[in-house]
Amino acid sequence: MASADMFPNVSFSDVNAAASQEAAGKAVFGPDPASGAARLSLVRPGAEQAFQIDLSDAQIFKLGPMEWLCVSGETEAKAGVEEKLFSRAIKVVLRTEAESKAFSLAFQRWKQQTISGKAGESLENGSIVACKSKFDTKIEASSAQMYFHYYGQLLHQQNMLQDFVRTGTYYAAVMENRADFEGKVVVDVGAGSGILSLFAAQAGAKHVYAVEASEMVEHAQRLISGNPSFGQRITIIKGKVEEVELPEKADILISEPMGTLLVNERMLESYVIARDRFLAPDGKMFPTTGRIHMAPFSDEYLYVEMANKSLFWQQHNFFGVDLTPLHGSAFDGYFSQPVVDAFDPRLLISQSTYHTLDFTSMKVRYIEMILKLIAFFVEVVIVCTKCGIIVFHFQEEDLYEIDIPLSFVSSVGTRVHGLACWFDVLFNGSTVQRWLTTAPGSPTTHWYQLRCVLAQPLYVMAGQEITGRLHLVAHSAQSYTIYLTMSAKMWGVGADPGGILQTSTAKLELKEPYYRLSQPQAYMPQDQQQLPLSSLQAQGSGQQMQDGLSPGITVDQERDSAAFTRQV
């Protein structure tokens, strides 16, 4: 069990006593030395005895901003059996509202540990088994560990803070909409360094709860303490939004839950869960809406670069070993990587389309709706021999699978090499509506853009329709598998009157992209993109094709496909 939580300056009184007066002392949450059970001790200075409150059946009620009523059952042993005789009520008064909120959070945290019980503890008709939280149920432990380790490091926080498009847009969205923050309770979901919490406090928030699950909370606490004019109104809470408890509802949620292609890392699901757990019915969300934008692109240089990566595996005599059996797998592997870079918008061959995700209204599905009434007990599953297993399951269905139909009209005749994607989010403030965009041609962000490259390009003419489907399926490694299908009709000698449907498909892993950030982003006019690979190599790709090959291996530049000859 965790180390004790102490509040050194409180006053308390026994409401049950006929002539009880408030006494100064301290309140300590901690384990009982004998049994290990969670308890609240209220101790007067110099007194030998203290009020000992068993948290297993205790409840607290808020009487005022700094006053709480703690009610628990009193027991007495009769014939060796403890019997509940009556309820005891203790009034506890804290010094400040901040301490009052911290007291409530400590009570809920220790109470929750008591309810969870001990794994394997015997019951009359079964046993208590510790249940994973919603986050732990759907996410692999190894992925979560790496994720929180990554965001627990200041160098990665610095990378995000130095994205001035990102940070500046958040700052502007908050400050331009002070009316949404002044005097309001704010929850910062995944607070990281605490920068958004400080923005909210600058805008006049009454109180900000900064929820962060990584070790970054220690740095955030120092940063907030170093800005005392704002920090006095910020409470940092370590834990996942799926698990922590807050003493009050929020008027506004603020978060930066976006990943590559908007949905990578699956933090949007936690953002939606925080909405349902903490946000008041008429509350606001910053950001409010997200959009995934898509358009087909033509980029012969990128395609050649991707295809050439597998040339290494076409060597027939690599120190006496024939590597060619692995060439096909290597080729497929390189094309399973989405490309993350900043590309020239002139590479797009059609107007873009977009798919909208409204964070304020995304559906939340329970397997059993009745579980809403007993959500307080989701930390345990009682395995009962009489009634079976009760399973608590929470699913953010709009984010588990995202299915987007595609329809474009090509503006030029060219080869289609895949689908380009980017996103933007809206901060729908009462005063100003502000967008944060990652679009090509706009100031570059640390998200860049993403392109899904087809191993088999399509041929289209100007005015021709391109159809398809973009299907994103979430998995337990905090990311998505991308299934892309693109189709276009082809006409020519021997083709049917209606044309021949050419279709190309791709399966890509969003978690394993190819970061092409150091490559030159050359733009090639469409009328030059039909050159054969030999011409492209003569313009500068030949050295790229040679890179990575063993000494004595050369590329036959007379063929479009990769071929090798041994130097004599």
Image (cartoon, rainbow, N blue to C red):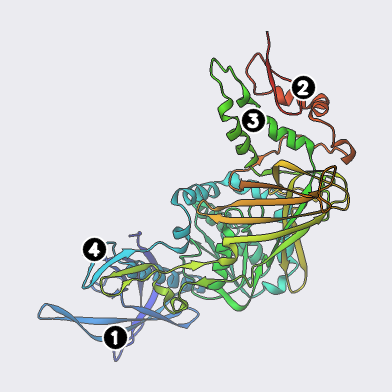
Drawn side of residue 534 relative to residue 85, left or right: right
What x and y, as percent, mark residue 156? Answer: 60, 46
| Earlier-in-chain disc, 3 versus 1 | 1
| Earlier-in-chain disc, 3 versus 4 | 4
| Earlier-in-chain disc, 4 versus 1 | 4
Name which residue type carries label 2.
Gln
The secondary structure type at the circle numbered 3 is: helix
Dot 2: few (<14), some (14–19), or many (≥20) neighbours within 10 Å?
A: some
The secondary structure type at the circle numbered 4 is: loop
Drawn side of residue 67 relative to residue 438, left or right: left
Name which residue type carries label 1.
Ser
> Nearer the observer, disc 3 or disc 4?
3
Q: Which residue is mark 1?
A: 87
Q: Which residue is mark 3?
A: 310
Could you tell me which residue is drawn at 67 percent across and 47 percent down? 505
Alpha carbons under labels 4 and 1: distance apart: 24 Å
The secondary structure type at the circle numbered 1 is: strand
What x and y, as percent, mark residue 281? Answer: 60, 79
Q: Which residue is mark 4?
A: 33
| Earlier-in-chain disc, 2 versus 3 | 3
Dot 3: few (<14), some (14–19), or many (≥20) neighbours within 10 Å?
A: many
Dividing the image into 4 quarters, which one contains the N terminus?
A: bottom left
What x and y, as percent, mark residue 462? Answer: 88, 49
Q: Which residue is mark 2?
A: 557
